[in-house]
Image (cartoon, rainbow, N blue to C red):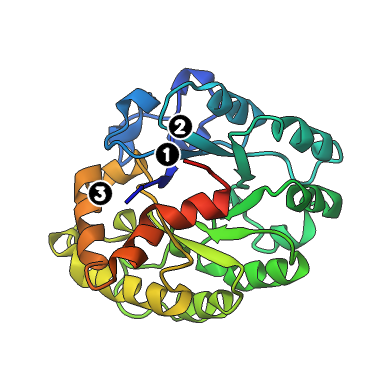
Amino acid sequence: MTEIDAHCHFWSLARGDYGWLEGEGGPLAPIRRDFAPSDMPGTAPVIAVSAAPSSAETDYLLRLKHPRLAGVVGWVDLAAPSTCGQISDLAINPRFRGIRPMLQDIPETDWLLTAPRADTLATMARMNLTFDALVTPRHLGVLATFAAQNPDLAIVIDHAAKPRLAVGGEDEEWLAGMAALAADPRIHCKLSGLLTEVSPAQLADPLAVLGPVVGRLLDWFGPERLIWGSDWPVLNLAGDYALWRSLTDQLLAELTDDERAAIMGGNAARFYGISL
């Protein structure tokens, strides 16, 4: 089985555009340092995903050299009039596979429907670039409208839209929104970023929390539209790579070998257009 880690990050803090990592101490202290491809655990090819809303960071990721780096999902200003040309230039690099706006950090929930330029989105679709949707439950209705308005754009939901696991109980907004999005066979979902959504107390038995969530994702998207990622090094805030990999094996244990292979690599290769 050829695996792909479809969601990880690399950063160099001295570059100065990681505002969310500024400061000292606090819960982000374990990841407030540089992370390079050579630090990455595991052996699978990886997709590096932008962690800063800047074109400079996208250029930084594309300049990284490492045999495991199979693709980059970067950032561009989707609202700027000059972005079509920028996307065309970026797409010359075969490792540039998609774009991710930092939707979770934008106060306006409906930004996705009002700010991105139609010609920019059309350029993305024409160049077979993907759209990584970094969303939370408040965005799911907006994302459904956006998807319907852009039928030629390949969309993947990052981190399963971050269900509010730490508060306990059913997240009705997440349940309704994700079920509706999954009805569109074009939309994929990343099986990533879930461990950091559970509370410290829940980490004592993460399978009890994550099992029902992954079960719903499998029911909605099926093994053919789920894409595994580690979300390393953000993952380190809740556990480590080996723990998430072990939990994944347990969460997918009842699937067939072919279904597991699809989630662990095949779907990412197809979605991002990567030849391994």
Q: Earlier in the sequence, mark 3 or mark 2?
A: 2
- Farthest top residue? 14
Q: Are marks 2 and 1 in contact (CB under 8 Å)?
A: yes
Residue 85 vs residue 231: left or right? right
Residue 73 quadrant: top right
Residue 24 vs residue 77: left or right? left
Give percent across and percent down for residue 48.
48, 37
20 shown above or below 245 = above
Label count reads: 3
Tag shown at residue 238: 3
Give percent across and percent down for residue 63.
56, 21
Tag shown at residue 276: none
Q: Earlier in the sequence, mark 2 or mark 1?
A: 1
- SS type, badge 2: strand
- Tell me the residue that label 2 is attached to: 69
Give percent across and percent down for residue 147.
69, 67
Q: Residue at x 55, y 55 (%)?
A: 271
Give the amino acid at mark 3: Ala
153 shown above or below 18 = below
Q: Nearer the viewer, mark 3 or mark 1?
A: 1
Q: Characterize the local packing of mark 1: few (<14), some (14-19) or many (20 or more) Cα atoms within 10 angstroms.
A: many
- SS type, badge 1: strand
Q: Characterize the local packing of mark 3: few (<14), some (14-19) or many (20 or more) Cα atoms within 10 angstroms.
A: some
Q: Residue at x 66, y 69 (%)?
A: 142
- Tell me the residue that label 1 is attached to: 46
Q: Residue at x 34, y 65 (%)?
A: 258
* Depth order, front residue of 184/223: 223
Q: Is residue 240 visible to us here?
A: no
| Measured Cα–Cα span from mark 3 to mark 1 | 20 Å
